[in-house]
Amino acid sequence: MSEGKPIQCKAAVSYEAGKPLVVEEITVDAPKAHEVRIKIVNTAVCHTDAYTLSGVDPEGLFPCVLGHEGAGIVESVGEGVTNVKPGDHVIALYTAECKKCKFCLSGKTNLCGAVRATQGKGVMPDGTSRFHNKKGDTLYHFMGCSTFSEYTVVADVSVVAIDESAPLESVCLLGCGVTTGFGAATKTANVQEGDTVAVFGCGTVGLSVVQGAALRKASKIIAVDTNDQKKDYCFQFGATDFVNPKTDLKEGETIVSKLIDMTDGGLDHTFDCTGNTKVMRDALEACHKGWGQSIIIGVAAAGEEISTRPFQLVTGRVWKGSAFGGIKGRSEMGGLIEQYKRGDLKVDEFITHKREFDEINQAFDDLHKGECLRTVLNF
Ligand code: NAD
Ligand code: AHE
Ligand code: ZN
C-alpha cells in the first residue's frame, strides 16, 4: 500500500525555459488534507505547455512538472476529501471549482478563487510542493495539475470523477483543448442557429470551436489558418469555408475585408485561437457592426497587449475572453462525457499521434507540425 507514503515514479521535469524536458525518477509526497494523489494514465500536450516551456509565461516557474491535459485513477486522498475516492477515474482541472467562493456562487463565471493564487505560484494551497527530484530539489507544480508525472497531487477542488466506461486515453483531452473550444462556442459565445462564425487558428482549440458552432447549426463557419494542412480537419469538424491569409487574399484585400465581404458586413462571432495579438485585432474587426462579438481564447506572451480603435467598440462590437470554455469542471464534465459517448462531441478525432511517455519531447515537436492536433502520451 502506497497510501500515506511518498511514491517514486517517472516524470518529465522542465528545468529551464527553452530546454528539453528531462524524463527521470522523482518523489511525489502523499496528499495532505483536501488533496488527491492521482496515478496519471494518459496526458496530452497542449500549446500552453509549449508556451510556458518557451519562457514567455509570466507565471512560468522552473524547475517544474508541466502538463494540464490529463486523466487517471485516484491512488489516495488526504483528510477531508469527499468528492473522490481511491479507484475513481478522474480528470485534473486547471480551472478549479470549489462551489463556495464568490466566483463559484456568482453564477456569472467558471473562474474559481479557491486555489488560483497558489496555483499561479506553482505550489499547493498550503504553499508547499509535493514534488522533489533525486537531489532533493523542490519542483514546482503547474496550473494545479502537473500531469507530466506518473503520479501527481492536486487540490480536491481541482479534480472531477468521471464515468469509468469513458476511455482515459480519449477523455484526457477534455482536461483542456476540446472542452475549451467547445465551451467557448456553446457557452461563452452561445452561438445560435443561423449565426455566422469565424475561427482564427485551427488547432485542437479552434477545431473544437468549429465543432461547437456546427452543433449549434451556425450557417457559416469560416476557418482561418496560415497552415493549409489544417484545411481537411476544418471541414471534417464542420467548417463551411477555409481561408489561408497567407495565400488566399487578392491584391489590396486583407483578412478582415475578405471576411466582411464573405458575410455581408461581418461575423456574428469570431474566436482567436492563436494567441497572436494582431490576429486578435483582426478577429474583433471582422465582427459585424452593432452586435458582433469576438472571443479571445489564445494565450499571449508576457508584455503583449491588444489594441484597436475604440470606435470598433463604440459601434457595437464586443470583445470577450474565455478560460476553459466557461465550463465549470466539476459540475459540467459529466455532461460533456455523455455528449462524447452519444457521439455529439468529437474527441477521438483529435488524437493524431500516440506515444509512450518517454517520448514526451517528440510530442512537443509534434505540436509544431501542421498535421498534429494532439499527441496523447501513455504511461
Ligand atoms: P495549436 O498550436 O495546436 O493551434 C494553433 C493554430 O493556430 C495552428 O493551426 C496554427 O497554424 C494557427 N495559427 C498560428 N498563427 C496563425 C495566424 N497568424 N493566423 C491564423 N492561424 C494561425 O494550439 P492549441 O492547443 O489549439 O491552442 C490554441 C491557443 O489557445 C494557444 O494560444 C493556447 O495557449 C490557447 N489555449 C487557451 C485556453 C483557454 O482556456 N483560454 C485553453 C487551451 C489553449
Ligand atoms: N499564465 C498566463 C495565463 C495563461 C492563461 O491565460 N491560461 C488560460 C488557460 S490556457 C490552457 O491551455 C486560463 O484559463 N487562464 C485563466 C486563469 O485563471 O489562468 C499569464 O499570462 O499569466
Ligand atoms: Zn491547455
Image (cartoon, grey):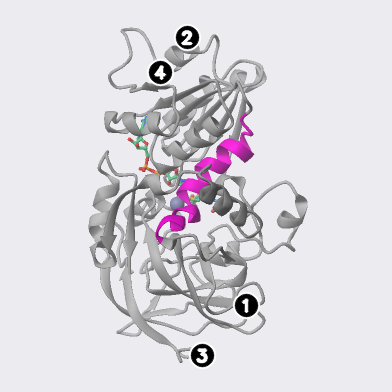
Q: Is mark 4 within 8 Å of ligand 1?
A: yes
Q: Nearer the viewer, residue 370 or 355?
A: 355
- Marks 2 and 4, the one that precedes in the sequence: 4
Residue 234 position (above or below residue 245): below
Crowding at dot 4, Cα within 10 Å, few <14 / some 14-19 / many 20+, comes out as: many
Crowding at dot 1, Cα within 10 Å, few <14 / some 14-19 / many 20+, comes out as: some
The answer, for residue 61, to whether it is visible in the render is yes
Residue 203 position (above or below residue 63): above
Which amino acid is tagged 3?
Answer: Gly
Disc sitting over residue 261 in the figure: 2
Write the start and end of the magenta stretch as one range: 169-191
User: Which mark lies nearer to you, 2 or 4?
Assistant: 2
Which residue has dot 1 on it?
34
Q: Secondary structure at mark 4?
A: helix
User: Which mark lies nearer to you, 3 or 4?
Assistant: 3
The quarter of the displayed image where residue 6 is located: bottom left
Which amino acid is tagged 4?
Answer: Ile
Which amino acid is tagged 2?
Answer: Asp
Q: Secondary structure at mark 3?
A: loop
Q: Secondary structure at mark 1?
A: loop
Q: Is the stretch drawn in magenta largely helix, strand or loop?
A: helix
The quarter of the displayed image where residue 168 is located: bottom left
Which residue has dot 3 on it?
4
Which residue has dot 4 on it?
255
In percent of width and height, residue 188 lies at 62, 38
